């Protein structure tokens, strides 16, 4: 039996809400995921660094500074806000307030016209506001999980939420690439049609529309959660909740070192999450450098990876309920290690040290054997990455006292953000020192091995 923190009380409900309440909660992931897919990964971030900033290197550094600044705010404030929410009892008002920041910040990205230096700082501020909004809203949405289903179904709920979110991200990406974003050279979308609504490819309106689309998508699909998913009853006003929350957070942090299960898991999560985020972030960059991929190839790769992640998260949720989240996390880390080792043994003209035909100009999409092998390994990363994230929040729920779930999701967000710069920094440093992309990517092996070793020492209560 794992140790638990003082102050925990058995707050399990005697009955659970109807199915529509669970579906409403799941749709939050669907509503929020396009922000990560469209804004931070595949569309707007590359557009900003390439066409808004003076040059790609400068744009990447500025985008990184904005990401780091928002991450610092999230890391420092998440535990406190979670403690306040636990003290006040309410979740939805916080989700509404931070969801509004996501909507406002995302909508403002429409005004980011190419080649206008005066818009750079406002765009970065809008991006920071939206990032803070979506991350904090996610903290409070996660904290609603224990009241929705019995403990033995938490894993399936978490996995289904992640899978649903990935599907939403895939559809939003297909919508933009296929119907809204036209190529400046041809004026046509990925499906070969003229962009909907007369969006001008020359001024990259198809890239910029991802901001308002993300905002509208969130507003529409988060409504079922507000309408059908029950909230905790209010226990105290915000001012008294703030005082109580600060006191409880101080007590939790003081007692945390005495409770090795939770402390060790949070450290393990910090390490392997840093590795996973870095792997996702640099997977496309590595492929671009190795195979010469561009937007079409990287976008298609992203869709395939997201499909694999959605399937993995859904299957991982069932395995979570059957075997426990700790085993799912461990299995996912082993698969990620296999994928990284495999990538390190692939080059444009070789696989596992065996020579193959390299990519040829005009040879077709993913026509070379090395590219196809990379796609398979990318799919393996997706299959492992979805369950890893879903099972991690399930394990946190099993370890956390039920009356401090939001607070511990705040600490969970803290461990996922506070060292998020280390992985990319080490990859960049080692790549520069070795003049090798493989050398930089190899550092991720250490993250997954260390996370797996720490996880092995975590004792989970039955």
Image (spheres, rainbow, N blue to C red):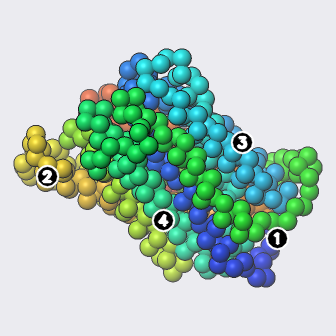
Which residue is drawn at the image coordinates 63% and 53% (left, top)? 219
Q: Which mark is residue 305?
A: none
Question: What separation in Å lies between label 3 and label 1 (alpha carbons)?
Answer: 25 Å
Secondary structure type for disc 4: helix
Q: Nearer the viewer, residue 316 or 59?
A: 59
Q: Nearer the viewer, residue 249 or 179?
A: 179
Residue that mark 3 sits on = 77
Question: What separation in Å lies between label 4 and label 2 (alpha carbons)?
Answer: 29 Å
Earlier in the chain: of badge 4 and badge 2, it is: 4
**Residue 113 visible somewhere in the drawing:** yes
Earlier in the chain: of badge 1 and badge 4, it is: 1
Crowd tier of the residue under label 1, counting other residues whose Cα lies within 10 Å: few below 14, some 14–19, many 20 or above: few
Residue that mark 1 sits on = 9
Residue that mark 4 sits on = 163
- The answer to whether residue 248 is left or right of residue 137 is right
Camera-near label (2 vs 3) is 2
Residue furthest toward the front? 198
Total number of numbered discs in the rendering: 4
Residue that mark 2 sits on = 367
Question: What separation in Å lies between label 2 and label 3 (alpha carbons)?
Answer: 47 Å
């Amino acid at each position: 039996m794992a140790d638990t923190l003082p102050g925990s009380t058995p707050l399990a409900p005697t009955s659970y809400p109807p199915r529509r309440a669970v579906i409403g909660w799941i749709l939050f992931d669907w509503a929020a995921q396009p922000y990560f897919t469209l804004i931070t990964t595949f569309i707007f971030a590359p557009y900003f660094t390439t066409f808004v900033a003076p040059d790609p290197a400068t744009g990447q550094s500025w985008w990184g500074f904005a990401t780091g600044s928002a991450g610092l705010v999230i890391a420092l404030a998440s535990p406190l806000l979670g403690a306040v929410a636990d003290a006040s009892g309410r979740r939805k008002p916080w989700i509404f307030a931070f969801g509004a920041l996501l909507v406002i910040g995302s909508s403002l990205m429409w005004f980011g016209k190419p080649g206008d230096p005066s818009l750079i700082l406002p765009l970065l501020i809008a991006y920071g506001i939206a990032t803070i909004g979506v991350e904090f809203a996610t903290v409070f949405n996660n904290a609603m999980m224990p009241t929705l289903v019995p403990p033995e179904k938490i894993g399936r709920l978490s996995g289904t939420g992640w899978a649903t979110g990935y599907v939403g991200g895939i559809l939003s990406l297909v919508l933009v690439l296929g119907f809204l974003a036209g190529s400046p050279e041809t004026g046509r979308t990925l499906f070969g049609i003229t962009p909907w609504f007369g969006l001008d490819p020359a001024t990259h309106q198809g890239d910029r529309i991802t901001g308002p689309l993300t905002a509208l998508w969130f507003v529409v699909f988060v409504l079922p959660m507000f309408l059908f998913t029950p909230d905790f009853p209010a226990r105290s006003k915000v001012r008294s909740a703030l005082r109580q929350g600060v006191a409880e957070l101080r007590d939790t942090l003081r007692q945390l070192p005495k409770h090795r299960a939770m402390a060790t898991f949070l450290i393990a999560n910090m390490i392997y999450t840093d590795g996973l985020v870095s792997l996702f972030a640099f997977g496309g960059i590595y492929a671009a450098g190795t195979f010469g991929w561009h937007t079409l190839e990287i976008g298609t790769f992203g869709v395939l990876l997201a499909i694999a992640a959605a399937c993995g998260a859904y299957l991982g949720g069932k395995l979570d309920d059957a075997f426990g989240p700790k085993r799912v996390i461990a299995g996912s880390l082993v698969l990620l290690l296999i994928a990284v080792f495999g990538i390190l043994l692939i080059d444009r003209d070789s696989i596992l040290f065996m020579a193959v035909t390299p990519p040829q100009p005009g040879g077709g999409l993913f026509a070379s054997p090395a590219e196809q092998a990379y796609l398979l390994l990318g799919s393996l990363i997706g299959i492992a990455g979805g369950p890893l994230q879903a099972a991690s929040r399930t394990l946190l729920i099993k370890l956390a006292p039920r009356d401090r779930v939001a607070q511990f999701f705040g600490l969970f967000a803290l461990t996922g953000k506070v060292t998020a710069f280390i992985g990319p920094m080490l990859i960049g440093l080692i790549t520069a020192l070795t003049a090798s992309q493989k050398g930089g990517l190899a550092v991720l092996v250490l993250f997954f091995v260390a996370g797996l070793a720490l996880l092995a020492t975590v004792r989970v209560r039955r």
